[in-house]
Image (cartoon, rainbow, N blue to C red):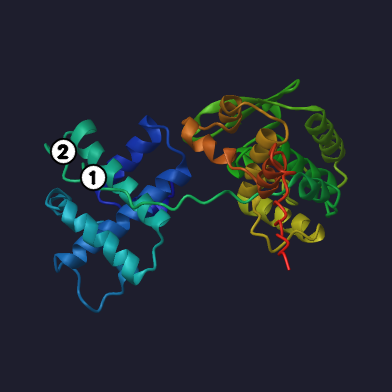
Amino acid sequence: MNKDNLNDCPDFLQDFLFYMETIKGRSPRTVDGYYIDLRSFIRFLLIDNGLVSDDVDYKEIKIHDASFDLIKNATRTDAMRFLSEFQRNHDNEAKARSRKVSAIRSFYKYLTVSSGKLSENPMLNLETPKLKKALPKYLTLEQALELLTHVETNFTERDFCIITLFLNCGMRVSELCGINTHDIRDNQLKLLGKGNKERIVYLNRSCLDAIENYLRVLNSGEKIKRVDKNALFLNRFGKRLSTRGVEQIVEHCLKESGLDGMGISPHKLRHTAATLLYQDAGIDIRVLKELLGHESLSTTEIYTHVSNKQIEDASNRSPLKNVKPPKKKIKEQNE
């Protein structure tokens, strides 16, 4: 959890953030997201209640001195007006508003159920904005192979290994960055996923060879002097590779493969792995759920989408595909 964010929080918000991180096991990134969304809500309440001068810029409003009464007296209508305000003035898309609703509901649930600071939850029936279900972007099998054959960088062995793990294991970028060398045991890799939940993925021959080749070069000290003694993937300074660093590596490799401009990111490589495992390898959806670390099967079901090629193939397999239209019989007229 970001210390600067913590210093800006009133006590009741600090307590909630600590609770989400230590008791509920939310990641620091998730907790920071809660802070940002709840800070926006508190700023809205301060303005709405006339507690902030008109000449103060919205982003400069401090929430540290906000009273608990501000939160206690807020209503579901206030929250709905807050969401409407953000949609109108900040061009918030439904996904961002949905995240804000989730933060507000979690906060008020904590205040009523966990801490007992409120006797009733005014946000109990606050509805989440309806999200448009979009099919995930992914690379085809041919494009994935093209990407793997065009990994040429300043540290090709490391970057090939990264791309290989993404495309074979379907891990999140945060999970990849968090891998330590001792997390690998034979063909098993321990990952730390969302909510600090651990899971095991199994490494195929391609992954094992890529890791072995990368570690051989890394341990030789030819390209990087190790500073971080635990991290598997290191940057040029010998420290743990960041998520942004991974994003830049993927962007470069996509460009070299002629696959840039398609909106593909590390997370889309996760989509690619899931789609290829389901559509091309025929992996059961329940097995795929465990591999990806999803809590709910409904989350995994987005990968059951069908491709245009599958639709075309289905049409071509129709038992009636060869039926031709009847020829119109022309009656001869008697002269």
* Left or right of 208 on screen, residue 19: left
Look at label 1 and name its amino acid. Phe
Q: Is residue 231 visible?
A: no
Q: Are marks 1 and 2 in contact (CB under 8 Å)?
A: yes
Q: Earlier in the sequence, mark 1 or mark 2?
A: 1
Percent of width and height locating residue 226: 76, 41
Q: Secondary structure at mark 2?
A: loop
Which residue corresponds to mark 1? 12
Question: Count of labels shown?
Answer: 2
Determine the residue positioned at 56% across, 25% down: 286
Q: Is residue 55 above or below residue 103?
A: below
Disc assigned to residue 322: none
Counting from the top left corner in percent of width and height, residue 47 is at 20, 67
Q: CA distance from mark 1 to mark 2?
A: 9 Å
**Which residue is under mark 2?**
117
User: Residue 316 is drawn in which quadrant?
Assistant: top right
Can residue 41 be seen? Answer: yes
Q: Is residue 143 above or below residue 210?
A: below
Give 122 or 327, whichever is nearer the viewer: 327
* Mark 1 Cα-neighbour bin, 10 Å: few <14, some 14–19, many ≥20: some
Q: Is residue 18 left or right of residue 184?
A: left
Q: Nearer the viewer, residue 284 or 170?
A: 284
Return the x and y of residue 218 as percentages of the image width and height.
82, 40
